[in-house]
Image (cartoon, coloured by chain):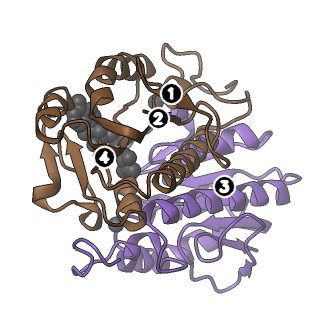
Chain colours: A purple, B brown
């Protein structure tokens, strides 16, 4: 980060997490993040394949990870939590699988509806500000935690703050710190 | 593409180009595209390292590839062509390196300004519609072609239509059809 306006208040790595080395570009970081997300998801899908509880996708966004999960997961319903729909037409869940609203409200409501039954929860709710992402991860950790079934896995782009879940090492192909995996 | 609204008029792969295999998700395709873009850029930067002519980035977007190029290229000015600025603060070129406007106008104007001097031209101008991208690639190919210096390379996310440039095989690490490399 020598050239350009790199010394401004919020360096790019505050979003994508600190670069592994100084000569990583934003493109490198972004690729690491996407590759790690896929590796963690594939690992978690395989680990929970024998479970029948629902899968929760927190944050639909463009819908790429939802598209991936829908293709790789069979026999388990995938419920999508999103505040504001902006997904690709091919990656838009059917209405009845969409839980529209702020997760700060829809997660507690889902505990009433589903109980501790989720086999897999994936969260990619972060935005451009790592401090905000971290604060939000702290806020929703206790709302996510009770939804997981025993043996269920949680995959997150941000570090979570759980009392009773165990953090697992990231699977092969994932870069440490770019994705986090937890098991109940 | 079995589940969900996959049989609508415009399947997802019209943007990202046809999937390599049927069980590729949009996430897989997107990763392939980014990884191929980086591999082609790194190859082209290395191949043209001894040249001193300017580098042109056509389509700044978020600025990730510009950030990568700025980090990997030294001793060559990088001019950025963009219609509408929306880049990350860390990946925004200084004003004097920005050529603002539609490339259909700014490319011909740049031929007057720079002549056939570019050592490297990277284009990632495409949007969500492959047919439109292809039509646009046909339209700008003759505007790009005369800007390259002899020995200069052009890297594009869309197939280009050049009369005098040679298409090179994609370098190691890139997926065929996700990125294109041409040499004058
Ligand atoms: C896919 S984005 C580029 C992404 C970039 N490679 C990155 O890594 O962030 C495409 C960009 O091309 C620009 N663009 C598309 N058509 C254009 C045109 N006719 N003239 C100038 N810019 C154009 C768009 O405004 C958009 O910012
Ligand atoms: Ni950012
Ligand atoms: Ni699309």
Q: Which residue is identified by label 4? A: B57
Q: Nearer the viewer, mark 1 or mark 3?
A: 1
Chain of the residue displaying label 4: B
Label 2, label 4: how many angstroms apart (C-alpha)?
A: 16 Å
Q: Nearer the viewer, mark 2 or mark 3?
A: 2
Q: Which residue is identified by label 3? A: A38
- Tag 2, which secondary structure? strand
Chain of the residue displaying label 3: A
Q: Which corner quadrant of the image does residue A161 belong to?
A: bottom right
Q: Nearer the viewer, mark 4 or mark 1?
A: 1
Q: Residue placed at 46% from the left, 62% from the top?
A: A125
- Tag 3, which secondary structure? helix
- Outermost residue toward the right in this view: A50
Do discs 3 and 4 share a chain?
Answer: no
Do discs 2 and 4 share a chain?
Answer: yes
Label 1, label 3: how many angstroms apart (C-alpha)?
A: 35 Å
Q: Which residue is identified by label 2? A: B183
**Which label number is shown at residue B166?**
1
Q: Is residue B53 visible?
A: yes
Do discs 1 and 3 share a chain?
Answer: no
Q: Are marks 2 and 1 in contact (CB under 8 Å)?
A: yes
* Image vertical order of residue A137 relative to residue B37, above or below: below
Mark 4 residue CB less than 8 A from any atom of ligand 1:
yes
Chain of the residue displaying label 1: B
- Tag 4, which secondary structure? strand
Which of these two is toward me, B111 or A54?
B111
Q: Residue placed at 77% from the left, 54% from the top?
A: A45
Q: Are marks 2 and 3 in contact (CB under 8 Å)?
A: no
């Amino acid at each position: 980060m020598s050239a350009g306006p790199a010394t401004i208040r919020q360096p790019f790595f505050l979003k994508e997490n600190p670069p592994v080395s100084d000569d990583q570009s934003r493109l490198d970081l972004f690729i690491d993040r996407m590759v790690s997300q896929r590796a963690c998801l594939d690992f978690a899908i395989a680990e929970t394949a024998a479970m029948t509880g629902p899968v929760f996708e927190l944050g639909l966004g463009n819908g790429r990870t939802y598209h991936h999960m829908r293709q790789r997961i069979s026999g388990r319903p995938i419920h999508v939590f999103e505040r504001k729909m902006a997904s690709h037409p091919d990656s838009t869940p059917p209405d009845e699988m969409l839980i529209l609203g702020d997760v700060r409200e829809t997660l507690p409501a889902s505990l009433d509806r589903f109980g501790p039954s989720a086999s897999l929860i994936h969260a990619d709710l972060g935005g451009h500000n790592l401090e905000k992402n971290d604060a939000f991860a702290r806020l929703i950790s206790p709302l996510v935690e009770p939804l997981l079934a025993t043996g269920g896995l949680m995959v997150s782009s941000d570090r979570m703050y759980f009392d009773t879940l165990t953090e697992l090492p990231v699977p092969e192909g994932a870069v440490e710190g770019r994705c986090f995996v937890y098991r109940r």
